[in-house]
């Protein structure tokens, strides 16, 4: 079943916004996957750096969650539909879940760093699709999301030095 035409007012062509919406929905799915993994690690971190990592993971999770709403609303502003469920997220995500019973703090830092860098690449795909569609609003806001993910990766890298 296809989604009905939402008739959202936009000067962008429907076929062009579809590719942007697809890229945004992929970024949305990866953002939710990263949010849940970051919260999982926040809940399960242990060891001598517990407080620092626990607080950093919580701050990063909050930032990622805030971005999800902006991504979904950008999809809707272009007249498209966004993800609707955990199942829908899992069908669109490219980041791998981590269901391990135990993950060392060092491995948590590395995995989250790598996932944030992968999210940066996903955001670059969004930016390219937006540029191709002439969607300068999406093209502009994705720069902020990219910067946030790069900063998270940097913090995770620095926290893991010598650990």
Image (cartoon, rainbow, N blue to C red):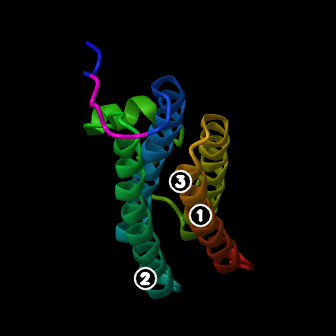
In terms of depth relative to the viewer, which is nearer, 139 or 22? 139
Residue matched to label 1: 149
Residue depicted at x 41% and y 40%: 10
Q: Is residue 160 left or right of residue 6?
A: right
Q: Is residue 153 left or right of residue 12?
A: right
- In three-dimensional space, the C-alpha distance between marks 3 and 2, rounded to whole angstroms, equals 33 Å
Q: Is there CB contact under 8 Å for labels 3 and 1?
A: no
Q: Where's residue 97, x and y in %?
A: 45, 44
> Residue 42: which quarter of the image?
bottom left
Q: Residues within 10 Å of mark 3 (few under 14, many from 20)?
A: few
- In three-dimensional space, the C-alpha distance between marks 3 and 1, rounded to whole angstroms, equals 19 Å
Q: Where's residue 34, x and y in %?
A: 46, 54
- In three-dimensional space, the C-alpha distance between marks 2 and 1, rounded to whole angstroms, equals 17 Å
Residue range of the region highlighted in magenta in the rendering: 5-10
Is residue 13 on the magenta stretch? no
Q: Is residue 46 left or right of residue 122?
A: left
The answer to whether 94 is drawn above or below residue 37 in the figure is above
In terms of depth relative to the viewer, which is nearer, 19 or 105? 19
The main secondary structure of the magenta stretch is loop
Residue matched to label 3: 137
Which mark is in front, 3 or 1?
Answer: 3
Badge 2 marks a residue whose secondary structure is helix
Residue depicted at x 52% and y 84%: 49
In terms of depth relative to the viewer, which is nearer, 136 or 150? 136
Residue matched to label 2: 55
Residue 105, numbered label: none
Q: Where's residue 32, x and y in %?
A: 39, 50
Q: Earlier in the sequence, mark 3 or mark 2?
A: 2
Q: Residues within 10 Å of mark 2 (few under 14, many from 20)?
A: few
Q: Is residue 114 visible to the viewer in this orientation of the structure?
A: yes
Q: Residue furthest top?
A: 1
The answer to whether 155 is drawn above or below residue 18 in the figure is below
């Amino acid at each position: 079943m296809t989604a009905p035409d939402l008739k959202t007012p936009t000067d962008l062509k429907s076929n062009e916004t579809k590719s942007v919406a697809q890229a945004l929905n992929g970024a949305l799915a990866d953002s939710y996957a990263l949010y849940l993994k970051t919260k999982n690690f926040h809940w399960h971190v242990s060891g001598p750096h517990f407080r620092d990592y626990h607080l950093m993971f919580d701050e990063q999770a909050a930032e990622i969650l805030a971005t999800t709403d902006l991504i979904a609303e950008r999809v809707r502003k272009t007249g498209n539909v966004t993800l609707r469920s955990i199942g829908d997220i899992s069908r669109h995500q490219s980041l791998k879940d981590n269901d391990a019973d135990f993950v060392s703090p060092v491995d948590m830092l590395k995995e989250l760093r790598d996932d944030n860098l992968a999210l940066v690449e996903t955001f670059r795909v969004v930016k390219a699709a937006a540029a191709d569609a002439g969607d300068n609003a999406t093209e502009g806001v994705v720069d902020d999301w990219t910067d946030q993910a790069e900063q998270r990766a940097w913090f995770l890298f620095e926290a893991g030095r010598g650990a």
